[in-house]
Amino acid sequence: MSAFILSVIADNHPQGQVACLSGNFLQLTLSQLVDPDPLLRRWAVLSIAKLWESFEEGKWQAVQVSAPEKLCGLLTDAVPEVRASVVYALGLFFSGPSVNPPTAPSPAPSPEVQDARTSVDMKVGRTLHAALADSSYVVRKELVIALSRFAQAYEPNVRDAIIELINDDDPSPQPPLTPSRVKKPAVGQRGGSRGEFRRSGLDSSQDGSTPASPGPGPSSSAQLRQVCALVWRMIAALRADPYPEVQSLASGLYDHLIRTSGSFPAYTGLGTPSNPPPTSTGGNAVGPQAGKRPTTFFGKNALSASASSVSTPTERSVSPVLNSSAESNPPQDLIAGITPDGSVALQSQFYEWSCQHFLLNPLMKQKIEDTTSISFSEKLWRRQRNKAFYEDAKEYKDRDVCKKLDDQIAMLDNDTETTMSLLLHPFEPLVVVADNANGISVWNLEETTNKINFFHNLNPSSSRISNTTFINEHDVALLLVASDDGVVRVWKDFSSSETVTQVTAWRALSELPSRSSRGMIVDWQQPNGLLFVSGDVPFIRIWDVEKEMSVQDILTLSETSVTTLTNDKSTGKVLI
């Protein structure tokens, strides 16, 4: 609460920023970045962001205490909202003039201060490359906004880098940073080490002193050109992001920079994303505004209990903000778009969204469930249904009865040439069928005359669906769809043509060869909330879906492809 109040004092208030800076604000706030409470870490970062927003004196003092470098150490934090707050803060650090400047703007910095600031900006710009591999679309969305602020602060340099890259006829961006190229923390570890950033030249000196400024000269100019080119390539790579909102924001920023850099209106290189498939007749294509971030779907309350459990699941032990109803759906428009005055910097609403936590009823923060609500009654009914199902299945198994499958109960025509995946819901009479492109059909076995829903998976036309699985099938199930381009998409309300919504999407296996014969193989482990992915690669990657980060790669020690994956669903200790 104290960190939140300090951030409000400094929010768009120059006098408040000066008052915070006159005390020991930065040192005290930076000491909280290692606190075990993720909500405190998050608001410590946001309060620092508000301190230096459009405030040159605050930025300079932050450089003196190596605040940007210390924030970069949280880019591998175990909580995605903390990582998003870091990207948000770093974007404000090297932003140019504010769209709504304060009434008493601070004076322009001296050349020495600006040189030191530029040096830190370049190092931060390089380090933000790691956020491209983040599986949280909120982090990647904030990354687009942060890159737009860098492009605004160094707009002439970025334009020169764009023209140079186009003249060099280099239409292919560097591949997005993959999780295998980022040092992965061990399972359960909260965040990465600062040594990782020290090796990349970002951390301060061993004695904690301010990093030395490179000073003006050809070498620093060349380094700035390289960083601007890297920022441009990151923007181009984000145009092919699997989440529609991130892709749309990056495409708008990309097109704006192309238009303002010179006479290249028809240039479409540097990672142009494939067009989404058209909507089929009678189908339902989900557009860019369909996805919201319902964090409750990936909380411990949904992941920790196995399908056979009927006891009350444990709540997520981290910040209560992640499971609150007010913050379960962040705003669709996290940016206001290109500003009317033509400024390239995009505006984020991440801070306003985070503030909603303190507007909640205290009972909601404590996750006290209303036992009289309809949702509680439905959850209780599902637990009783699952328990009865397992008891009947156990009794049937004990009879040791073997029957021939002679009776055909349905014939499902999906109007496609090939069926790539078939998935049966374990508790409900639902069948999910994926075709050889990107169409998903949902059937109710009790009503086999018509399919109850059909929608597109939004993967590019050059890829196909290779695998499907359910998440939280014992409660309100989510549908996870993997395609052979290495992308995973998660859908909720998949059985409803009116409310089907994309929850999240990320590139889970970017090393997968194009046109892979096996595609991407996935397996879900419900007790621990882990997703195993593999295919035509020599390893099995493990994703922690709650943390929204890759935690481990397991070498297969084989030259052949992985064809199938399964794990012990009850204990989660065995993977085959």
Image: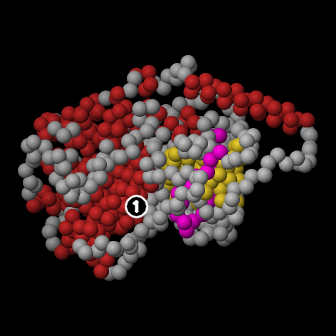
Q: Mark 1, residues whose alpha carbon is within 10 Å: few (<14), some, or many (≥20)?
A: many
Residue where numbered disc 1 is placed? 238
Query: Where is residue 420 drawn, in percent x and y?
Result: 68, 60
Is 511 on the left-hand or right-hand side of 166?
Answer: right
> In this view of the protein, can residue 392 be seen by the observer?
yes
In the rendered view, tell whether residue 510 sits above or below residue 442: below
Q: Is residue 202 magenta?
A: no
Residue closest to the far top = 372
Query: Where is residue 536 drawn, in percent x and y?
Result: 62, 67
Is 423 on the left-hand or right-hand side of 329?
Answer: right
In the rendered view of the protein, which quadrant contains the N terminus?
top left
Q: Is residue 468 magenta?
A: yes
State the residue at coordinates (33%, 64%). Answer: 254
Q: How many marks?
A: 1
- Colour mapping: secondary structure
Magenta region, residue range: 452-473
State which quadrant residue 127 falls in: bottom left
Is 179 on the left-hand or right-hand side of 417?
Answer: left
Q: Nearer the viewer, residue 576 or 276?
A: 276
State the residue at coordinates (41%, 58%). Answer: 247
> In this view of the protein, can residue 535 be seen by the observer?
no
State the residue at coordinates (13%, 57%). Answer: 113
In the rendered view of the protein, which quadrant contains the C terminus?
bottom right
The amino acid pointed to by label 1 is Leu
